[in-house]
Image (spheres, rainbow, N blue to C red):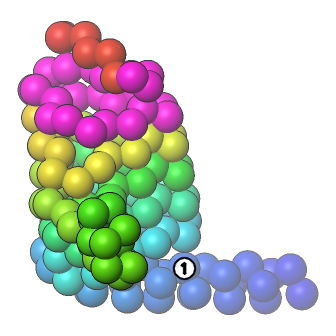
Amino acid sequence: MYKLFKIWLTLYRNFYKKYYLKSLKKVGNNVQILGDITLVNPSNIEIGNNVTLNPNVYLNGDYGVKIGSNCSISAKAMIISTELNKEKLIKESKKIHIGARIEIGDYVQIGAGAIILKGVKIGNNCIIGAGAIVKKDVPPQTIVYGNPLKFIKI
């Protein structure tokens, strides 16, 4: 029975990966999905070559997300291109979202549980530490960690 379940699970995961990759705006070669992920508006998400998405990664593409090549996004990381417009929510009692495109350069590593917020641009060769909340741009060749964010130039 276990062998049958394992075969079914392998088939399901392969279908799941192909389905998600086909729903993206652009996808490079050798993109690996290593578990369940969540994609919101995948038609606005672009992923380069040799990218690894680990379990429970959340990508919100409402306003666009571009991930460069040779990147690794660790478990439970979130890339969120929207937020609530608080003024309209209070004045008009409506849930109005605002946002901006997120761009992640090549050779970027995003640690477990890190959160990248709307409009952020992350340069090439960067490391985002586990649990970091990134609200502003990260220049190339920089390590960022903590909350509030601390920057170390490599």
Classify residue 95 as left or right of residue 85.
Answer: right
In this rendered view, identify the residue nearer to me: 147 or 38.
147
Classify residue 78 as left or right of residue 50.
Answer: right
Q: Tell whether position 97 is magenta.
A: no
Q: Is residue 27 above or below residue 145?
A: below
Q: Position of residue 79 (x, y in %)?
A: 34, 55
Name the residue carrying label 1: 13
Classify residue 153 as left or right of residue 2.
Answer: left
Q: How packed is label 1: few (under 14 Cα within 10 Å), some, or many (20 or more)?
A: some
Q: Is residue 52 visible?
A: no
Q: Position of residue 59 (x, y in %)?
A: 35, 65
Q: Position of residue 150 (x, y in %)?
A: 32, 16
Disc 1 secondary structure class: helix
Circle count: 1
Segment tinted magenta in the rendering: 124-148
Residue shown at 54% from the left, 59% from the top = 55
Q: Quadrant of the N terminus?
A: bottom right
Q: Tell whether position 141 is magenta.
A: yes
